[in-house]
Image (cartoon, grey):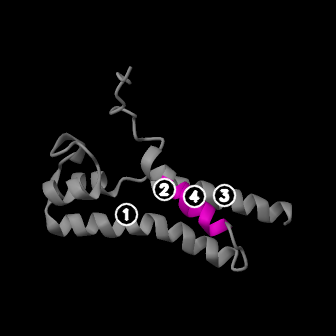
Amino acid sequence: MSATAAGIGVALVAFGYLAGSLSPSVFLGRLFQGKDLRQYGSGNAGTANAFRVLGSRLGLAVLFADLLKGGIPVLVTRLVFPEATYTPYVVVVVALVGNVDGPRQGHHDQRPNTDM
């Protein structure tokens, strides 16, 4: 693998992480209903809370956007590296990591360990 291809691979992994860290539920909730989804329902910015708080139409839009934020980086990776075996898998795993532990998550719901 050349240095240019390696650099493109790193950029695609970073793109996957950043795409995964986007929160379409918060964006769509604010855009269409003026609500920060994290302040309602379960307090989670997930799709299930979007269905409960925003309704089925916006809930479906959130679900579709969540699928796209993982699918688009993998599709772009497949287009750039059609012969790559493992790169799309790395990109999708990194997108999942970005979804769960992105830079904008805030880590506000971490609880101290009280097990002894």
- Quadrant of the snapshot with the C terminus: top left
Q: Amino acid at mark 3?
A: Ala
Q: Earlier in the sequence, mark 3 or mark 1?
A: 3
Q: CA distance from mark 4 to mark 3?
A: 6 Å
Q: What secondary structure is the magenta-colored segment mainly?
A: helix
Name which residue type carries label 2. Answer: Leu
The label nearer to you, 4 versus 1, is 1
Q: Of marks 2 and 3, which one's residue comes earlier in the chain?
A: 3
**Which label lies toward us, 3 or 1?**
1
* Contact flag, marks 4 and 1 (Cβ < 8 Å): no
Q: Quadrant of residue 78?
A: bottom right
Residue beneath disc 2:
96
Amino acid at the residue labelled 1: Asp
Which kind of residue does numbered mark 4 sit on? Phe
Q: Position of residue 2 (x, y in %)?
A: 86, 65
Residue placed most toward the observer, 82 or 48: 48
Q: Label 2 vs label 3: CA separation?
A: 16 Å
Q: Assess disc 2: are there few (<14), some (14-19) or many (≥20) residues with their C-alpha within 10 Å of its C-alpha.
A: some
Residue closest to the far right:
2
**In percent of the image, x 47 and y 56: which residue is there?**
20
Can you say which quadrant of the picture contains the N terminus?
A: bottom right
Number of marks in the image?
Answer: 4
- Which residue is identified by label 3? 11
